[in-house]
Every structure is written in C-alpha cells, then in structure tokens.
Amino acid sequence: MKHLILGASIATLLGATALSAQAADTSSKRIALSNNYAGNSWRQAMLQSWAQAGKIAVSGKQLASADSFTTPDKEVTTQAGQVQNLVLQGYDAIAIDAASPDALNGAIKAACDAHIAVISFDGVVSEPCAYRIIIDYKTISERQFDYLATRFPKGGNLLEIRGVAGTSIDNAFHEGMLAGLAKYPQFKIVGSVEGDWDEATAQKAVSSVLSSLPSVVGVVDQGGDGYGAAQAFQAAGRPEPVIIMGNRQDELAWWKQEHDKNGYTTWSASSPPGVSSAALWVTQQVLAGKAVPHDIVVPPLEITQATLDEALKTAPVGGVANVTYSQEATIKIIAANTHK
C-alpha cells in the first residue's frame, strides 16, 4: 500500500507552484525530450506525463519550451541523428530515454561539449557527462524471484520474457534474473523469448514456444507483456502460471478477473511512466545551476493483491498505473539522493 499512497501524494503535487529559491532564471531555456520508442502503453503514458509537466513549466515561466521527439524506429543510429539535430536546433538541454546504454555516447558527449546538459532516464546511458535518473530494474527483477520463492518454495520451471534488445533496461532485468536464479537455484529457466514490452508481441512470442516447453510454474518478465503471456497460455490450453505483472491496466484487470474467479494471485512492479516528469524537472534544476547528483534513483511502483483494487481505480483503460512528479516532489527526490 505504501507505494500507491506515495504515488497518490506525489500526484497531488503536480499543480504545485515552483519553489522560489532558484540559482538562475530558466524562463528562457528550451529543453527537448529524445525518445526512441513509443510502441506500448508505458511509453505513451511517459510522453503524456512529459507533456503535462512541460505545460506546467512553460505556463509557470520556468521554461520557454519542453518539446518531445520520438524516432520512427528503434535504431540507435536514428536516435543519435536525432540528438545531433537537437544540438543544431539550439536546445539548452536534452532529456533522453536511450536506445542503448553505450552506443549513443558519442552523440551525447558532443552535446555536452556544446554546453548542452543531457539527462538520461529509464533507458540510461554510460557517458560520464550525462545525468542518470535510474529505476533499479535489476532489483525489481530479483524481487520477482523473492515473490516466486514464497509461492513455490521447492522451485520449478520458469519462462523468461525479455524486452527491447540492447537497451539498458533489458540488460538490467536480465542481470537481475541471473541474480535471482543464483539466489534460488531451485528455479530453472526453460525458455526465453523477446516480448519488446508489448502485449501483442509477447503473446505471439510465447505462443511460438509453448508447444516445446515443459510445465512452468511462473513467468518472469519486464512489464508490458503479462496479459499477452496470459492469453498465450489460455489459447494453448495450458495451466495458468504465476505471471509477474508490470502495472498495465489490461493485465491488472485480467489479474482481478482471475482472482475473483479462482483466487489467482501474483505481484506487479514497474517504473512509473511519470519518471519523465521527474526528468523534466531535474533538467530544469540543472539549468538553474542547482547541485544535482549525476545518479538519481527513483523508487518503482509496486502493486500487490492488497492494493490491486486501488490501482485499478486510477489506471486508465488501455494505460498503466502511474505517478506524475511536480517540481517540488522532484526537488525532494534530488535532496534524498544528495544525502545518501
């Protein structure tokens, strides 16, 4: 419950006025969002949260503009070109949800050398000049195994659904899965597919391997794929495994339906799409000359059986459970990370 309560309390701060103590006037500053992928409900909600926070920042004269740009494909070279174009267009800072943790470093270093602040979030980068707003995906992945171990103390076979290949997010989740297997060797991965954080893609990928898989007790994944996996198992006439969810409304609704019908229970966690709004305000604070850590950790949003009904009340149909951060809430997150 505490995570949902935290999300609700932060969300109420969305309309809060800016804190007056600023080291520099940022009202003339222009920032841009570089996004490499918008093909699922999480990314759509992320873009909406950016737009909401940007509208508040511009109307409150904290920024002159907060534009967003999404590449037409998931290719690293396309996003690198996008970043280069944003530099040429004279933006003062770039927030980026990156297609690769390393392959964009050249374009990002060039932006930094041009005195443009770069703030990466969700899909973060390794270039030292860039700031990183981090959701600890590795820990989320490890905690999937903590939960499954409570359900299946003797272990069992698992199916892994991976995300978009090459991203820092997919890498971190997979590292957490390996750590979970090391901690709980009674579990075994008997199949792995790419779901691209998308329900339809995940359903097709899972369906393609089910006939060759032994019985599985659980599905470990990265979010955006739980409902697709459930549909694949149902269509194949296979027993429902415990599928870890990623806070999407359709999978939460399916979870509730199955729980009401047969007591089905699972666990769900994801980064809130509203981390983009935190990225916007971190960017504004950097431009204001504030002391901002280069690495900032934002907690995930968790949903349990006890908080499922509450989460469904606020998650939009076809969308995802979310938290949108105000400037004031973001400053508190910065302070908490500064004092670690």
Image: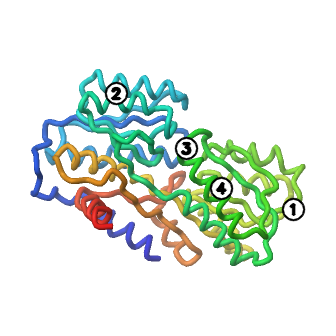
Which residue does the numbered mark 3 point to in the structure image? 40
Residue type at mark 3 is Asn
Quadrant in the rendering for residue 3: bottom left
Which residue does the numbered mark 4 point to in the structure image? 221
Q: Residue furthest front?
A: 128
Residue 22 position (above or below residue 75): below
| CA separation in Å, label 3 and label 2 | 30 Å
* Secondary structure category for the residue under label 3: loop
Which residue does the numbered mark 2 point to in the structure image? 110
Locate residue 12 relative to residue 70 in the image: left or right. left
Give the crowd class for mark 4: few <14, some 14-19, many >=20 residues within 10 Å: many
Q: Of callouts 4 and 2, which one flags the residue occurring earlier in the amino acid sequence?
A: 2
Residue type at mark 2 is Ala
Cβ atoms under marks 3 and 1 closer than 8 Å: no
Mark toward the viewer: 2 or 1: 2
Residue found at x 89% / y 49%: 212
* Secondary structure category for the residue under label 4: loop
Give the crowd class for mark 2: few <14, some 14-19, many >=20 residues within 10 Å: some
Give the crowd class for mark 1: few <14, some 14-19, many >=20 residues within 10 Å: some
Residue type at mark 4 is Asp
Residue found at x 67% / y 44%: 200
* Residue 73, image x, y percentages: 54, 28
Q: Of callouts 3 and 1, which one flags the residue occurring earlier in the amino acid sequence?
A: 3
Cβ atoms under marks 2 and 1 closer than 8 Å: no
Which residue does the numbered mark 1 point to in the structure image? 215
Q: Does residue 59 appear anywhere in the picture?
A: no
Q: Of callouts 2 and 1, which one flags the residue occurring earlier in the amino acid sequence?
A: 2
| CA separation in Å, label 2 and label 1 | 51 Å
Which one is in front, 67 or 142?
A: 142
Which one is in front, 191 or 228?
A: 191
Q: Does residue 74 appear anywhere in the picture?
A: yes
